[in-house]
Amino acid sequence: MTSNFGLPQNLGNDLILRWATPDDAEELADFNLRIHSDDPNEPEEFLAHWTRDLLRGDHPTTQASDFTVVVDRAAGDKIVSSVGLIGQTWTYEGIPVAVGRPELVATDAAYRRRGLVRAQFETIHALSEARGHKIQAITGIPWYYRQFGYEMTVNLGGGRNYPLDLYQKAKPADDEPYQLRPATLEDLPFLQAQYALYCADGLLARVRDEAIWRYEMAEAHRDSEYARHFYVVEETAVAQPIAYVEYRDWGKSFGVREIGVRAGHSLRAVALFLIRHLEQEAIRLNPDRKKPYRNIHFHFGDAHPVYDALSRELPAGRAPYAWYIRVPDLPGFLRHITPVLEKRLAGSVMAGHSGTLKLNFYQTQMTLVFENGKLTDIGTFDPERVESGDAVFPDLTFLKLLFGHRSLEELDAARADCYANNEAAVLLPILFPKRPSRLIELG
């Protein structure tokens, strides 16, 4: 295999799979807008903006050559299918993890069921793994990506709504203890510190270096779903920054996607101020809008401290969807996060544990060998029976445990062929506790 991973490749029937170039940007933007928009009468323009952003050449991790396209020579080399790869760095409880995100997966309706996406995924996966990505992650349609080794394992989206007519009278602005202003690049040190606190309770979080902060704040197209719109909350009396928020127009809603408050300040007070501020914005803007603002959506999945701070104001929730995650080398990933596993074990009722944990995934098997609380080896075993082992996990259900999406008890209840013996039932929740993640789904 060459550095081009075997491309261009003839797929037959005049279809050629090749890497994209900057010259494809406009055609691919139009293609993604047409294929991905839910309603062709109201196309979702952010899809075109997002595509151009990724192919333009100034994205911190992604460029045109990170996209594959299938073109039909018989139709003037028009693009009929495409997949892109976005490089990111996440952390797993503080340990950096290189991630490849296949996104903007699309095929023209007239060319579907010909294996075009499968051919592109083989290439994209090879590129991703060659770059050292330990996992691949995608936000995509139900079931489809299970075909390519993915499992839905991390909460995506979801949140709670605050109806804008809940209170009829907002507090007058001149009585406010806080004020809100757009963030600037000079606020980066403050934003970085508060973002670190925002991510601190998450199992998974996305790393933002300075280049990514600058790109999100100033270079990504402002109308793209994946641009960020940061604001700083200051104390009115002294103009002292005490919090940051990120929100944008979501049609009929204000979508609040991040909020971080400096230690020693009230999250409830800041969140209530934000509600009052956005109520006033709705009053000001609604008369000129075809779709008036009706609520504020706090887009934090099914668990976040702001829900505790606003327990009465945010009574109803919308269940999250899920990220698809692929782990091509599970033993290698577990070796990478060994310090986390050993730390969890050291702080548990099984501190200093020695023994071999046999995990059976039915088609493959794995052993985790512990000596005095240290993970010393990861291997395999030959099962005497199909269900032999200390714990068994059908299909890719173990990934749900690994990434904190479901507890062992929940998996056991959902799948009759998923279970653990007495010792494993204590050890596995220690090694792999259920925990929320703080992933910001930026492109």
Image (cartoon, rainbow, N blue to C red):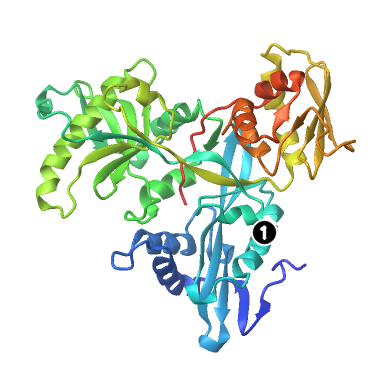
Figure quadrant of the N terminus? bottom right
Q: How many marks?
A: 1
Q: Is residue 371 left or right of residue 340?
A: right
Answer whether residue 82 is visible to the viewer in this image. yes
The quarter of the displayed image where residue 128 is located: bottom right
Measuring from the top left, give residue 230's x and y in whole percent. 33, 40
Measuring from the top left, give residue 422's x and y in whole percent. 75, 18
What amino acid is labelled 1 in the image? Leu
Q: From what the image shows, is residue 400 above or below residue 390?
A: below
Q: Residues within 10 Å of mark 1 (few under 14, many from 20)?
A: some
Answer whether residue 57 is visible to the viewer in this image. no
Depth check, front residue: 178 or 34: 34
Depth check, front residue: 197 or 284: 284
Taking the spot 34% from the left edge, 32% from the top edge, the residue there is 244
Measuring from the top left, give residue 148's x and y in whole percent. 65, 56
Q: Is residue 173 left or right of residue 32?
A: left
Taking the spot 19% from the left edge, 52% from the top edge, the residue there is 291
The quarter of the displayed image where residue 213 is located: top left
Taking the spot 68% from the left edge, 62% from the top edge, the residue there is 122
Residue extending furthest toward the front: 416
Q: Is residue 167 left or right of residue 129?
A: left
The quarter of the displayed image where residue 257 is located: top left
Taking the spot 48% from the left edge, 34% from the top edge, the residue there is 438
Depth check, front residue: 327 or 50: 327
Pointer 1: what residue? 127
Look at the numbered disc 1 and give the secondary structure of its residue.
Answer: helix
Q: From what the image shows, is residue 245 above or below residue 292?
A: above
